[in-house]
Image: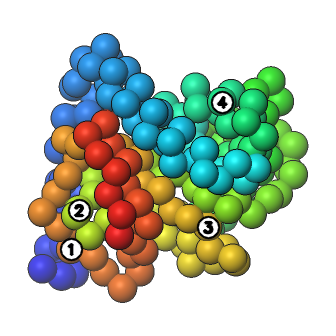
Amino acid sequence: MEGAELKAWRRSERQRLLALRTGTAPTVRREWGREIEGRLQELLAERAGITLGVYWPFQAEFDPRPLVDWLIASGSAVALPAVIDKKGPLEYRAWRPGDPLVDGVWNIPVPEQRDIVVPQAVLAPLVGFDRECYRLGYGGGYFDRTLAALAPRPLAIGVGFELSLLGTIHPQPHDIAMDLIVTEATLRRR
């Protein structure tokens, strides 16, 4: 599969997977979220003192905000991504709960203060994923461009729900695999 056929398939799969995710009861998603949070705490406990790039939840994604307080209490720092160029990589800005936020692209909050950092690890939300740890995102290419641009390259942790597992995303040359994928059911390593 390639070209227009692949684009159409990815668009269709995104819509199907987003409908599945948003159609799952919030109580179920919260339970899955607690499982994911526990796996992430276990994983990140080995990396105390890092800066972790998180994201503001959107369209019923796993909500990493409860993890933020735990990270800060354990001596780590957090950064949120901001779109500064729709064709470029994301910019990570240091952030702590209580710091002022402003609406960014798609009205997703971003830190008002432009304190740019390079995180040692980033959480990337998954619309879909495959067993090879390739991620199907929203189609903007932001995370792939960001991982390609950041030096040193951060540990890439895809985060999502098991219902988003695909046989393959049909990875293309620009697709960058996640190092790990964490769902409510398991942790997969590339």
Determine the secondary structure under disc 3: loop
Determine the secondary structure under disc 4: helix
Circle 4: residue type = Trp
Circle 3: residue type = Pro
Task: Classify residue 145 by image quadrant.
Answer: bottom right
Circle 1: residue type = His
Q: Earlier in the sequence, mark 2 or mark 3?
A: 2
* Left-right relation of 148 to 132: right
Q: Is residue 81 visible?
A: no
Circle 2: residue type = Asp
Note whether 12 is above or below 2 in the view shown. Answer: above
Q: Is residue 37 visible?
A: yes
Which residue in the structure is indicated by mark 4?
70
Q: Are marks 3 and 1 in contact (CB under 8 Å)?
A: no
The residue under the point 27% across, 19% down is 28
In front here: 93 or 190?
Answer: 190
Determine the secondary structure under disc 1: loop
Q: Earlier in the sequence, mark 2 or mark 1?
A: 2
Q: Earlier in the sequence, mark 3 or mark 1?
A: 3
Note whether 121 is above or below 55 in the view shown. Answer: below
